[in-house]
Image: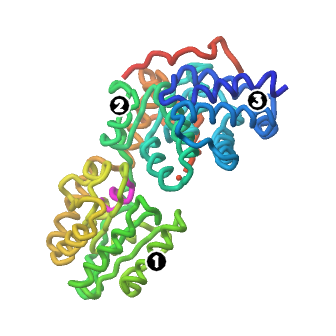
Amino acid sequence: MVARQFLPDYIRLLRELTPARSDPASVASVVDRLHEHFREFDYHRTMTDRVVWDAFGSIVADVWLREDSSRPAPSLGELAEAWRLLYRLLTVLAAPIPRTDLTHAAAAAFCGLPCVIAKLRWRTPYLLTEHGVYVREQYLNVSRSIRSSFVRWFLLRLISAIADLNYAFADQVSPVCRYNTRWERWRGVENGRIRVIYNGVDPVRFSPPSEPRPPSTRPLVVNVGLIFPLKGQLDLIEAAALVRRDVPDVEVRLYGSPSDAEYDAQCRARVRELGLESTVVFAGTTKEPWDVYRQADVVAVASISEAFPYSVIESMLTGAAIVATDVGGVREALGPSGVLVNPRDPAALAKAILRLLSSPATRRQLGEAARARALRYFTEDKFVAEYRGSYLRLTGASHAVRPTDRSVIRPTFAARTKYRADEITGTQPGMRPASRSS
């Protein structure tokens, strides 16, 4: 059964995913056929069948070697690792897909595959939100976390093909900042399908402190974010050592859970090496980030890569004085209401922190400007209104219903699972995406 019904489509999928640039319509067609198979047959039993494994090893290794004959053939272990990744990433195809008015995926990733299938089968409008840029994030993560050049090659080909598939079929692509649109245009998204929707935060919960911090309080710099290489905590630790030379009693408090154990260990080791145990505090997670920002004299964002981080607009709404690295959409968020420095430059980061610690008037001025800017552009109400308008426009309901009506659209199918470093109608598999409007 597997060899006769499933294997031809599986082989076609492998051949569609491994070229340097895939054809989204062809990928969508075979993805739809695989989903149809998994509606009737068990995913695990099918994917672990011997003929499936043999086909994977043969086809993927052949493409790898044909592209560059000087490459070493992949080992059995490398093939197994690549196969396990594909097995895990395609599990979403075994999930039932309800028929809805609209689909909405939170990344141009495997979570968008049900949305693509719904677009093929029922022409269901598809809204794609990009909090980060999935392709870019994975290029950064995979190059650091996977040692095998063969596995990296396979995974990046797979990720690129799936991202391009999502971009081709989405009726609207909504990055959270204009900075991200350069990546989407590079991957073929026309300007008419791109609609930036900024992240939004509740300005009541994230409000300024009722009273300023007493001058006698120990100077406090806070950082909020996962302990992860791209968040740059190691650079902030280096900066803390420089700041302490001029402000001996400064405290640098790092809030966030360690999503990368190795990096977390490196950060803690560097604190010990620099003798910063009384200066740098690993504060763990917090359920009240607004209170963290209110307590800070300076909020420091040391990221090496970002999209449009919530930590920036949250701290802006609390009226915090912010020093941040000039990456991604951070400049777009802060504008003139914060201090920007180059990434991977602890000396510049330290200099900016010292400047703000030495001037309460500058901190107050920047904090007031930051809140005013965030109230203008980055509130929760604006965020919700933008998405409500997009839902209504994509479903064709905007002409008949008030924009404030919350019950216009039947519940949408939102596929949200992301990989880290996610009834047949008359529509025929293999059809190209329907025409799109701006």
| Label 3, residues with CA under 10 Å away: few <14, some 14-19, many ≥20 | some
Three-letter residue code for mark 2: Arg
Q: CA distance from mark 2 to mark 3?
A: 35 Å
**What's the mark number on residue 39?**
3
Q: Going 75% across and 35% down the picture, which residue do you hit?
A: 54
In the image, the segment drawn in magenta is 309-316
Report the number of discs.
Answer: 3
Q: Secondary structure at mark 2?
A: helix
Q: Going 70% across and 46% down the picture, which residue do you hit?
A: 76
Contact check, label 2 and label 3, Cβ < 8 Å: no
In this view, 318 is above or below 36: below
Residue designated by label 1: 268
**What's the mark number on residue 185?**
2
Q: Quadrant of the N terminus?
A: top right
**What's the mark number on residue 15?**
none
- For residue 384, side relative to residue 44 (left or right): left
Residue 419 included in the magenta stretch of the image: no
